[in-house]
Image: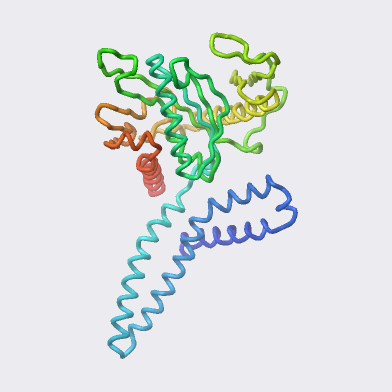
Amino acid sequence: MDAKIVKLDSIEKRYLEIGEEMLKDDVVSNVKAFTKLSKEQATLKGAYDAYQEYKKLNSDIEGAKEMLNDSDPELKEMAQMEYDEASEKLEKLNAHIDELLLPRDAEDAYDCLVEIRGAAGGDEGNIFAGDLYRMYNYYAANMGFKTEVMEVSESEAGGYALISFSVKGQDAYRHFKFESGAHRVQRVPKTETQGRVHTSTATVFVLPDVEDEDVEIPDSDLEIETHRASGAGGQHINKTDSAVRIVHTPTGITVNCQDGRNQLANKETALRIIKARVYNFYKEQKEKEAGEARKSKIGTGDRSEKIRTYNYPQNRVTDHRIGLTINQLDRIMEGKLDDIVNALIKNEEQEKLLNEQL
C-alpha cells in the first residue's frame, strides 16, 4: 500500500478515536483532558477532511471510467467531463495533502506568549512597540484568536518600553512564531521638527505557551520573591507586596510580574512565562548540541536579528528573510498580516519538502 495512504489511514483512525474519547464522561468532566484531545483533533482535521475528499474523488473517477464504456455517446461525453474534472481536482488535492503531511513543529498548535520591547530610537522605539502591539491585536482578532495582556511598562512619550501578552487559539504559535526578531521603522517622529526621517527599532520575542508535561521545573530550582509594584520613576503604585519576581537558578532566567490583580495572579503569570522561557532555553541548547540549529532563510528568531522594515514615507514593508516587499504598509498596520505570515509558512513548508526529498 502507498505510504501516503498508510499515513492518511492512520490519521483517519486517530481522528475518529479522539471523537469517541471526547464523548466519555470522565473526559467530558476533565477540562484539561478534553482541551488536550480537542487540540489534537484540530491538528488532524485538515488531513482528515482532505482524505475524505480524496476518497470521494477516486470513487468519482472510477465511476466515470465505467461510464466511458457505455455505448450512449451523450453518457460517454458526460463521463469524460466528470473524469477530467475529478482528475484535475485530485491532482491539486494530492499536492495539498503532501503539504498537510509534512512534519510540523510540535509547538505549532500551541497558544503563544509575545513580548515586545522598544529598542533603538528612545521614545520613538517605544511608540513603535505600541504600534506593533496594536497591529498584532488586530491580526489576532482577524484570526479568531484571543489576547490577554500579561505584563506592561508604559512609556511616558506613548507606546511601551515593554508589553507582553498571550495569544490563545488553534495554531496561534504557528502564525506568530515568525515575528521574533528586530522590527525596524523608518518615519518622521512626532517630535521631529525638521521633517527628517528617523530609523528606530522594537524587538519581538515569541514563545509557545507550553503544557505542564512539556517541561518539568522542580520547585527547588525556583527562587520566588514578592515586592511592592512600582510605576514609572520608581513611585509605588501598590502598598502591598503584590509584585512577584521568579528566578530559575540553573539558567538565571528571571521574570518579574506586577500588573495582575493581586499577588496570586502575578505569580501565576510569572510561572507561565518562566516555564515557556526555560523550555525554549533547553530546546535551543539541544538543537545546538545536535547540530540542528535552524539555518533557513526565515532565521533563528533571535531578537537581535533584523527581520522586517516598515517604511512609512513609501508605505512599504519588507520582510528581509524571504525578500518579500508589500506596498501597503497602512493595511499591514491594521493587522492585515496574512500575506506576510502565509508566505513565511509557505517558505517553511517548501524547505521541509526539500529536506524530505534529500
Q: Can you give x and y, in whole percent of width and height, for residue 166 in the image?
A: 55, 33
Q: Can you give x and y, in whole percent of width and height, for residue 200 in the image?
A: 35, 19
Q: Can you give x and y, in whole percent of width and height, for residue 300 in the image?
A: 43, 30
Name the residue: 53% across, 19% down.
Answer: 153
Name the residue: 43% across, 19% down.
Answer: 126
State whether residue 243 is above or below residue 338: above
Name the residue: 38% across, 21% down.
Answer: 201
Q: Nearer the viewer, residue 286 or 343?
A: 343
Colour mode?
Answer: rainbow
State whether residue 164 is above or below residue 296: above
Taking the image as shown, residue 85 lies to the left or right of residue 181, namely left
Name the residue: 63% across, 57% down.
Answer: 18
Taking the image as shown, residue 135 lies to the left or right of residue 212, namely left
Name the image quarter holding residue 89: bottom left
On the question of residue 190 being in view, the answer is: yes
The number of numbered discs placed on residues in the rendered structure image is 0
Q: Can you give x and y, in whole percent of width and height, for residue 199 in the image?
A: 32, 19
On the question of residue 249 being in view, the answer is: no
